[in-house]
Amino acid sequence: MSQPLVVLILSLLLGLQPLTTDLYLPALPALAAHFGTAPATAQLTLTALILAFGISQLLWGPLSDRIGRRRVLLAGVAGYTVAAIGSAVASSIEVLIFWRLLQGACMGAGTVCSRAIVRDLYAPVDGAKIMSKGLSGLGVAACLGPALGGLLGEAFGWRATLVALVVAGAVTLYVVWRYFEETLHEAHPAALHPATLARTAREIAVNRRFWVFSLLCTCSLGGLMSFLVSSSFIFIGLHGMSKAAYGLVLFSVSLFYIGGTLICRQALVRFGLQRTLLLGGALSLCGGALFAGLALAGVAGSWALIVPAWIYMMGHGCHQPCGQSGAIAPFPKVAGAASALTGFVMMSVAFAAGRWMGAHADGSGLPLIQAMVFWSLAVAFVAFICSRHTGSPATPR
């Protein structure tokens, strides 16, 4: 496959995640009202999806090492599309949560294989550059999702936002079926054997580089999840935004994320990995400081949340390519398993962050500010630690 084709496939696979989480966010309050449920229960349609997304990767990763990336992708994306149909026609909040949970589990196949594909085809530093391009595509999906969701929700109701995910799944399935060629050079026949799984997990878990780079993208994602899970209720419910205007807010946030991935790609070429990590950490820290500073100064309103989020998301765009590619770099022969563990850690923390936001929601923006300050400090600290582990991956498998 040509590099542009690889980037396109990565963008489609990775883009399913922000579309699935962001597209229906403008309609989330209307969804809660339709089913007569509390915001915290409606948020389970997102947090349950995220949890299933993370756990499922523990299976998809080793399975892709055993039978190849292509078959896992076809099964996962097909399952995602079926679950999207179920979500769109759900008759109760409980049924919707079930289908969203299944949708998240199937979505894990695309994400875990995306990271593994990059490791199959490219050396670590080149992999970070390719991953940044794929994540730029994810950013485009994140830009389009909320704006499109807001328009669809205003014009046709909240179900239309879920129907759009059926279309996204079907398009991705066709592209994978038609154009994707297997990238696994050598199958691992014993990848699913319990003893092999235990040994592989142990070897990954004791690798220091794996943990510092996994924690980089994990902490950065914690801030994003905190923003996503609460922002619709704050901007629409508290500040009175329309669904379309809220969609434009998320569009702008995603644009800054794309800008961060572009900065990452240029910084890797000009300054190297170490300084790129420090730059991303500085952006995260600045975003958190602005959240805190504006709150302490008594500045309220939508812009006091939007502008700091822009800066934080630029840092997020730097952290994700470096963190995701750096975590699996030491494990070329079990990239699927390493990708799976990375994804599990990321989504477990994202789920916890979402649940914390739901439990502490008080009708104000204060819990979001507190969460963003915490995650900004955590990301900046981990980025500094990561910058000291930018040498050759240790003990490649």
Image (cartoon, rainbow, N blue to C red):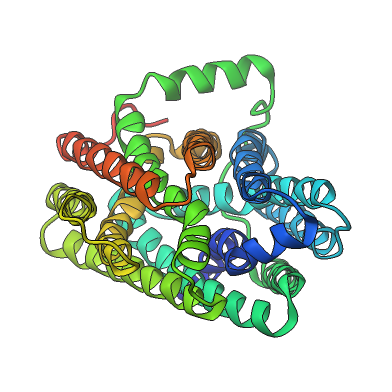
| Nearer to me, 281 or 23 | 23
The location of residue 91, given as percent across then percent down, is: 89, 58
Query: Splitting the image into 4 quarters, where does residue 216 fall?
Result: top left
Q: Is residue 362 left or right of residue 194?
A: left
Q: Position of residue 146 (x, y in %)?
A: 53, 72
Q: Residue at x 67, y 34 (%)?
A: 59
- In this picture, residue 139 sits left or right of residue 302: right
Q: Position of residue 22 (x, y in %)?
A: 56, 63
Q: Quadrant of residue 47?
A: top right
> Is the residue 269 above or below the residue 203 in the image?
below
Residue at x 23% of width, y 52% of height: 295
Placement of 117 over or under 156, stated as above or below: above
| Residue 394 visible here | yes
Q: Is residue 302 left or right of residue 109?
A: left
Res. 325 visible in picture: no
Residue furthest to the bottom in view is 155
